[in-house]
Image (cartoon, helix red, strand yellow):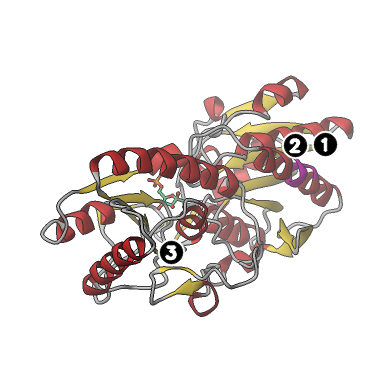
Amino acid sequence: MRIGVLTGGGDAPGLNPAIAGVVERASIDGIEVVGLKRGWQALSIRENDHHIVKLGPEIIREWSRLGGSKLQCSRTNPVKEDNDRTDLVKENMKKWGLDALIAIGGEDTLGAAEVLNARGVPVIGIPKTIDRDLAGTEYTLGYDTALNVICESAERVAHTAESHETIFFLEVMGRHAGWLALRGGESAFADVILIPEYPFSVHKLISVLKERQRENEHLGFEHRYKIIVVAEGSHIEGEEAVRRDSKLDEFGHYSLGGVGDYLKGLLEHEFKHTRYTALAYLQRGAPPTQRDRQIGRRFGHAAVELVKNGKFGHMVGVQKSKLTVVPLREVRKSPRLVDVDKLYDRERLNVKIENPLLEG
Ligand code: F6P
């Protein structure tokens, strides 16, 4: 038996441990694994000799600790309406002797996997995205590492913000979902957290910051800097999220980014010093944390088990801290967003701290 493994969409720490897990489990059972480079691209083109690599047990130790994807990623959509390559994917599978595929990706990569599976391509999914917004699983590879980077970076930003008595916008990723901002901001004791799920007003933002200042003074300390953790998809009510450029990817998404800079500009007349920095790709490139290595490896093993049992059209995942298996069509449901009523304090533009510790 021969399995092809691919990583699609944006990279996330945990991809390499998952590939290592696939190879580890497959080697024990004498199953061959080949890496398909650049997501769905390897199977969507004809000249693909340089896109296919044999993966043996020798990669396991090294790959298991590396960030990014040693197989590279792309946002190729093999089932794009005006450029459908399903037949070519099937032809390529035959050409390379592939009996099954393991696709590691988010909503787009696994959405395409689901469509292909329904058309007779045997696929298993492994969920990844630092945003942790995929339906059907409580965990997606990369989230924990990105969260740790945010937490550490917020501390660094706080030192410079304190020294210059600045209102500091720290922009983090999160296109539709504010999990990274919410939990990263919470851990960093941010003064304000802005998430895509709750469009806010500039007036409110200014009044919350001033109120925080009064609270600090009342408590008897002069805390003359403020940290605002802002998700890239957050936006002012009535406005759209700020786009980085006007390009659309193959799945129809714009790249977001710059909302922190935009808000910094809007607040400049109210506060003396405002600053902005975006963590952008620094969140994605870190070496995977223990959690992303462990879950990546387990996901890899579980995916090979599913291939062996012929349970195609499914994705491994986590529910209530347990490894689960769900139909791939789950990923096409609405993304897993922050429940604003439960978890977000609209008055303080911050996390609700009275809710159960780990909810969401
Ligand atoms: O989906 C994960 C993610 O990290 C989003 O938070 C972000 O909007 C997107 O990828 C950016 O990816 P890229 O710039 O690589 O297209």
| Amino acid bearing label 1 | Arg
Judging depth in this view, the residue of 20 and 280 nearest the camera is: 280
Outermost residue, bottom side: 341
Numbered disc 2: secondary structure: helix
Outermost residue, right side: 29
Mark 3 or 2: the one toward you: 3
Q: Residue at x 38, y 77 (%)?
A: 347
Image mark for residue 25: 1
Q: Quadrant of residue 211?
A: bottom left
Residue 281: where, in percent of width, then height?
Answer: 41, 39
**Dot 3 and dot 2 residues touching (CB under 8 Å):** no
- Sequence-wise, the earlier of marks 3 and 1 is 1
> Which residue is denoted by mark 3 in the rendering?
176
Q: Residue at x 36, y 38 (%)?
A: 159
Q: Is residue 99 left or right of residue 135?
A: right
Judging depth in this view, the residue of 140 and 227 nearest the camera is: 227
Numbered disc 1: secondary structure: helix
> Which residue is denoted by mark 2 in the rendering?
21
Mark 1 crowdedness (10 Å alpha carbons): few <14, some 14-19, many ≥20: many
Residue 22: where, in percent of width, then height?
Answer: 75, 38
Quadrant assignment for the N terminus: top right
Outermost residue, top side: 58
Q: Which residues are magenta?
A: 297-301
Q: Quadrant of residue 94?
A: top right
Vertical relation: 97 (above or below) 185? above
Cβ of mark 1 under 8 Å from ligand 1: the answer is: no
**Dot 1 and dot 2 residues touching (CB under 8 Å):** yes
Numbered disc 3: secondary structure: loop
Outermost residue, left side: 269
Mark 2 crowdedness (10 Å alpha carbons): few <14, some 14-19, many ≥20: many
- Sequence-wise, the earlier of marks 3 and 2 is 2
